[in-house]
Image (cartoon, rainbow, N blue to C red):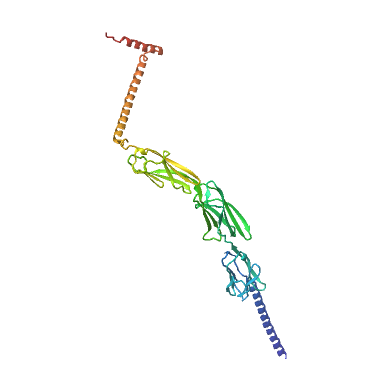
Amino acid sequence: MMVKQHMLFTLYSICGIVLKDILAISVAATKNKVRGAQGQFPIVQNMTVTEGGIANLTCRVEHNDNTSLQWSNPAQQTLFFGDKKALRDNRIELVRATSQELTISISEVTLADEGMYTCSLFTMPVKTAKAFLTVLGVPKKPEINGLTKPLLEGDQITLTCVTSGSKPAADVRWFKNEKEIKGAKEVNASGKTFTVKSSLQLLVNRHDDGVAYTCRVDHVSLTATHEETTQVLEVHYAPYVEIKHSIPAPLEGQYLKLECVPHGNPSPDPVLWTKDGGELPDLDRVIVEGRELTFMSLNKTDNGTYRCEATNHLGTSHAEYKLVVKDPNALPGPPDHALIGGIVAVVVFATLCLIIVLGRYLARHKGTYLTNEAKGADDAPDADTAIINADGNHAHAEEKKEYFI
């Protein structure tokens, strides 16, 4: 009897130990499962996309035990729960749905799509991660206002370049024939986008005729290019005239062409040729073709002042050319360079000889003067005696003179 009780007690003890181990294993497994669930976090990234482009939103988890992932928009509307679409928007599509990733795409993105998107992992408790979608507003093609055609020389105008719809604000730059110039910039907000203006004030002159002014828009959304608009100025101005001639020194018998070149807008055409205030003489020898006046064979009767006059609706201008025809036989011949060189050499040699002779003469007379001044001074006890002796010498010199009759 005692033996049976002892065996039964031992059996109960073994069963208790086994049940205790099973319970411990079960509790440990439950704790590990909870700890694993707590260690799962969705991973997302912020995204920037240009208006009208496609935004791909991706949510990932490193380890997942088939827990569902969900994407929601900034209004907290569910877009996709797993691979099930929840919002009726044809622009939103499923790209990939697995236990570790949920990727969706939004096409034809608008500024209204910008905001904070949420990815949720439905564990206990729910884990979330947020990604901000930034939408860049593309600036519209710029417009240049304030230009009228044609302009008159002396007009003062203001050119204004306007572009709208940019986000962030666009940069507007001015170019005059591809050379950048500075304008006055103004930025105004309109909802989420900006309108940018830039102005140029111009005092127009004739040199602005045909000049191209370009307004260029740079923006982060314009990665490979830029938007620009160009306007070419048309300026009307009164004419000015110049006369070009074919030869510099006209001679009798030569061919001469005078060309009248008027500058003005509108172009002053035709031009009027006159001589000495009157009509052109001898039209058989003088030919007028358009703006050109041609002398086939010059003679001295062609001498005079020739005038070209040009006119447009803004004014009249003229230029004059004084023609003096010379006789080719009366002109001096070319200079003999050998003769000129010989003359120059003789002059230089004579000058050198004169300098040498004059130098020797001056040196000789300077020595004679010093010698005469020193006579009688060597033996004199003092300066007065030396002077007397010198005078005496001069007196003796006078006595030595001989006179012949």
Q: Nearer the viewer, residue 271 or 140?
A: 271
Q: Please, is residue 172 above or below residue 359 in the view?
A: below
Q: Please, is residue 105 above or below residue 274 in the view?
A: below
Tell me which corner region of the image, top left, top right, bottom left or bottom right, holds residue 248: top left
Which residue in the rendered view is the most extreme toward the top? 405
Q: Position of residue 403 (x, y in %)?
A: 28, 9
Q: Nearer the viewer, residue 7 or 209?
A: 209
Tell me which corner region of the image, top left, top right, bottom left or bottom right, holds residue 83: bottom right
Q: Position of residue 348 (x, y in %)?
A: 32, 30
Does any portion of residue 390 appear in the rendered image? yes
Q: Residue shown at 65%/70% (left/top)?
A: 77
Q: Quadrant of the C terminus?
A: top left
Does any portion of residue 325 appear in the rendered image? no
Q: Quadrant of the N terminus?
A: bottom right
Q: Nearer the viewer, residue 47 or 381?
A: 47
**As drawn, is 346 to the left or to the right of 126?**
left
Q: Position of residue 145 (x, y in %)?
A: 56, 54
Q: Please, is residue 192 above or below residue 308 in the view?
A: below
Q: Nearer the viewer, residue 380 or 157?
A: 157
Q: Please, is residue 47 above or below residue 123 in the view?
A: above
Tell me which corner region of the image, top left, top right, bottom left or bottom right, holds residue 86: bottom right
Q: Position of residue 328 (x, y in %)?
A: 32, 38
